Image (cartoon, helix red, strand yellow):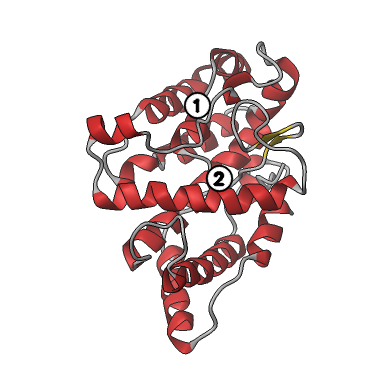
Amino acid sequence: MPIDGWLEALPGPESPTSSRDVADDVALFAGREHPLLPVRTVHHQVARLSAHLLGLGSAGAPGVSGAMDDGLRRALIGYSLYTRQLDMVQDRATKHICRDGCERPPLGCCNRSHNVVFSLSDIMMQHPTGLALRMGDALARLQAEEGTHHAHGAPMGERGCPYLTATGCTLHLFKSPLCVHYLCPTVADALNAAHGPEAVPFVAGMRRAANRQLERSSDFMDPGLIEAAVRMFAADGGAGNGGEGRLGGGASGNA
């Protein structure tokens, strides 16, 4: 699986202190709801990203503004668990539309660098908090790492988004909030046609999240969207019980 392959490849510190911090992060996220992810997937992702982010913080890595403190590290891990679930939803419900029915090929909505979290005008107009700004900086670093791994040497960024290749987006865990939430009119109409009234809360929520100003780190996510997606799929018999099975067919978010 591409996501797990990248997580396994991440470097991380090995020390008694970092091991305690990783264990604390795993325990924290084990106590939270992740409707589409099995417990073992959450444990693995949290442990690997926690160790890697601790390493970035201790090394003072370029591209990460400020210290990688507990708040920033956990905000990034939580965001990655959220985006992995949305990626799974899009694997099942939307990516085939982008691949086969895009009205603006070959770039579609990837026609610009929408991966950038904060532009200078965003910062001037929205006045994001310090944590939100540092989260945006860290996402840029993690996008570069994830994108390079998944590209496997394929050209990226010849036009449009720097993480777009001929086979699609190379980001699964660290898309920007705009990218992970955006639904073009073609996709929104297709979801409404396929799932009827149960699609309305999900489509409306995705649009709100894509247009939300990012003032705080909590603005990067809307966890209610995951439950809205579960209800949307349940209406047509596509949801089971427990983690990936709730999407009916073990979608992994790794397309």
Q: Is residue 201 left or right of residue 36?
A: left
Task: Name the residue rendered at 72%, 26% in the picture.
Answer: 96
Classify 84 as above or below 69.
Answer: above
Q: Is residue 118 left or right of residue 182?
A: left
Q: Report the disc number at residue 85.
A: 2
Task: Name the residue rendered at 48%, 67% in the picture.
Answer: 56
Seen from the viewer's position, the closer of residues 132 and 162 is 162
The kind of secondary structure element at disc 2 is helix
Image quadrant where residue 78 sits: bottom left
> Viewer-nearest of labels 1 and 2?
1
First-in-chain label (1 vs 2): 2
Image quadrant where residue 126 sits: top left
Image quadrant where residue 68 sits: bottom left
Task: Name the residue rendered at 48%, 47% in the picture.
Answer: 140
Residue 220 rendering spot, x and y as whole percentages: 38, 41
Task: Name the residue rendered at 60%, 49% in the picture.
Answer: 241
Please say whether residue 18 is visible from this viewpoint: yes
Amino acid on which the number 2 mark rests in the picture: Gln
Residue 193 rendering spot, x and y as whole percentages: 60, 13
Residue 205 rendering spot, x and y as whole percentages: 41, 28
Measure the alpha-carbon separation of dots 1 and 2.
Answer: 15 Å
Residue 122 rendering spot, x and y as whole percentages: 31, 32
Q: Report the disc number at residue 182.
A: 1
Amino acid on which the number 1 mark rests in the picture: Tyr
